[in-house]
Amino acid sequence: MSNITSSSSSSSPATKDGLSTKPPVHAAGKVEIHQETATIIKARLIQHVMQTYYFLNFTFLLVYPVLRLSGLISKPSNELMILYVSGFMVVIKILKNKNVDQILTGIIFTLKMSTLILLYYSGETQFKLEYTKKMMKLKTETSSSTESFEESEPFKFDNEKENIKQQNTPISTKDLGYLANFFHYGFYYVMVYLFVCMLVYLYKSQPEPKQSSFVHFFNQISLKNSLSFSVQSKELKDKYLLVEFFTTWSPPCTYLASTFSDLSYVYQGINFGKIDIGRWKSIAYEYDINDSVSSKQIPSIILFKNGLEVSRMPYRKNEFKIPYDKKTPKDDKLFEPCNLSYDNIKLYFNLDRILAEVKPSLNNENSDKKNNNKNTNKNSKKNR
């Protein structure tokens, strides 16, 4: 633990008792990922985005453009304004979030809301146009039978182009009342679209996180056994264990799953694990993790060394890169909001340094495996 804290304190502008109390500022691009590993991550990302959840949702986002281009629905007067606002919101979602699932789900939600608004106003425009044509037809029939009405009629019926223009200009429908102005075509468009979206949600409620064979799922017994083994083992590779404490109902946990999977894929020398504290309540109680809906600690990531906690995310204001103090009064408001992105997790827990520390142990293990394989091959040849 002393090695981790000392390395972080040298890069931090403020220290307390030899320990850093503020996150260090890192220059972008100093830590380079191997090209082969980056290629694998990109391939995994493409495969992740092509899953059924995203395919279905982005397909249903094409409903409005297809209906508009085919002429089945009318163009609302405020279409451009809605599209501009939607584009602005999409840009904000992209800039605000770094996690792929958060970005894509944010974009899908924004575009779905825009589609609902556009469908409603499109139905309203179609309703007003039909009402206008109906009123124009009624006025035309009335003017042909009454000369007095014809003299006071403001429309020029001898001008065919102007007549068509007036028919395509919606008139006010306030005289029809509130219900008639609300329950028009747009209302039914919205109801049908919501029904279809509900079916999609029931089929696929959220994106499936990227899985990794390097992440071990714990229960309350296996986690304690792993921590005990970490204490007893003499191998460096067994000393460190990075555990994610998650719940199945939390969207942030779903978003973090893919990031955690990628980290385990890149840092294969470090042991990664996950445990569902919604199921194993005793673990949440043991590590003082609040698993309520309003909690700021869901999800949490804890780094263990020799079975003891080194640091955790999210952390309390005065516990940056130091173990959690159970003597401090429990208050969820003391926890700093953390962006659990790939880079933030890597830098906070100093995974590059840990991987460099355990590499000698990994190299020795690989050489032992090669020697064992050679010996087994020689023995098999002799037996033949």
Image (tube, rainbow, N blue to C red):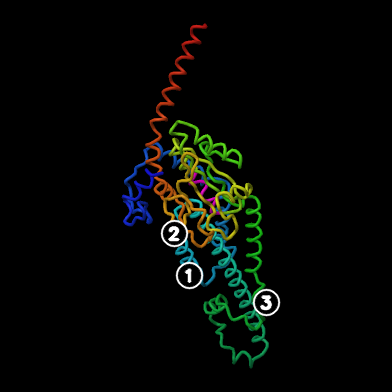
Q: Is residue 158 above or below residue 279?
A: below
Q: Are marks 2 and 1 in contact (CB under 8 Å)?
A: no
Distance (Cα) linking label 3 and label 2: 56 Å
Q: Quadrant of residue 121?
A: bottom right
| Residue 258 magenta-highlighted | yes
| Residue 239 magenta-highlighted | no
Residue 81, label in figure: 1
Observer-nearest of 349 and 127? 349
Residue 180, label in figure: 3
Highlighted magenta segment, given as a residue range: 251-260
* 23 horizontally vs 114: left or right: left
Q: Is residue 99 above or below residue 176?
A: above
Q: Is residue 63 above or below residue 301?
A: below
Point out residue 45 in the picture as x, y percentages from the top left corner: 47, 44
What amino acid is found at the position of numbered circle 2 in the picture? Lys
Which element is circle 3 on? helix
Observer-nearest of 121 and 217? 217
Q: Quadrant of residue 149?
A: bottom right
* 141 horizontally vs 157: left or right: right
Which element is circle 1 on? helix
What amino acid is found at the position of numbered circle 1 in the picture? Met
Distance (Cα) linking label 2 and label 1: 43 Å
Judge whether residue 377 can be spotted in this image.
yes
Sequence-earlier tag: 3 or 2 = 3
Point out residue 109 in the picture as x, y percentages from the top left corner: 54, 59
Point out residue 44 in the picture as x, y percentages from the top left corner: 48, 41
Sequence-earlier tag: 2 or 1 = 1
Q: Is the stretch drawn in magenta largely helix, strand or loop?
A: helix
Which residue is labeled 2 in the image? Answer: 317
What amino acid is found at the position of numbered circle 3 in the picture? Ala
